[in-house]
Image (cartoon, helix red, strand yellow):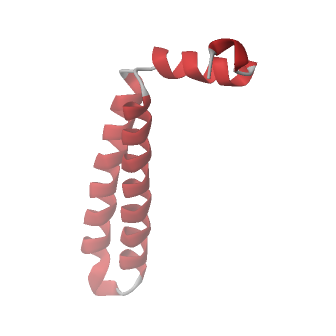
Amino acid sequence: MAKEELTLEEQVERIRTKRNGGEWKDRARRILNNVFLILAVCGVVTYFSGSENHINGIILVGIAMMFKLAEIVIRIIR
């Protein structure tokens, strides 16, 4: 497909993707964000599932926050 045939939105998206470092950063951010969400939900469920599981829940949420920080770093270095 030639550039003349692309719509304005497609051209803008192509330019934005090239300027932001490509699709690999977006894919990495999505994966890290999904891992964060899954771990955070598991941590909250573990925390509230019983009184003996509070430490395990806090540890899971802490690990989830590490994934979120990695995603934030990728967003900043864009």
The quadrant the N terminus occupies is top right
Q: Position of residue 29 (x, y in %)?
A: 41, 40
Task: Between residue 78 and residue 60, name the one nearer to us.
Answer: 78
Q: Residue at x 31, y 76 (%)?
A: 54
**Above or below, 4 relative to 37:** above
Q: Residue at x 47, y 14 (%)?
A: 19
Residue 51 falls in image quadrant: bottom left
Question: Looking at the image, how many numbered discs can be counted on the residues?
Answer: 0
Q: Position of residue 25 (x, y in %)?
A: 38, 32
Q: Is residue 22 left or right of residue 8?
A: left
Q: Is residue 42 left or right of residue 2?
A: left
Q: Position of residue 18 (x, y in %)?
A: 47, 17
Q: Position of residue 76 (x, y in %)?
A: 40, 24
The quadrant the C terminus occupies is top left
Q: Residue at x 46, y 20 (%)?
A: 20
Q: Residue at x 42, y 25 (%)?
A: 22
Task: Between residue 31 and residue 7, name the one nearer to us.
Answer: 7
Residue 72 falls in image quadrant: top left
**Above or below, 29 relative to 20:** below
Which residue in the rendered view is the most extreme toward the front?
Answer: 1
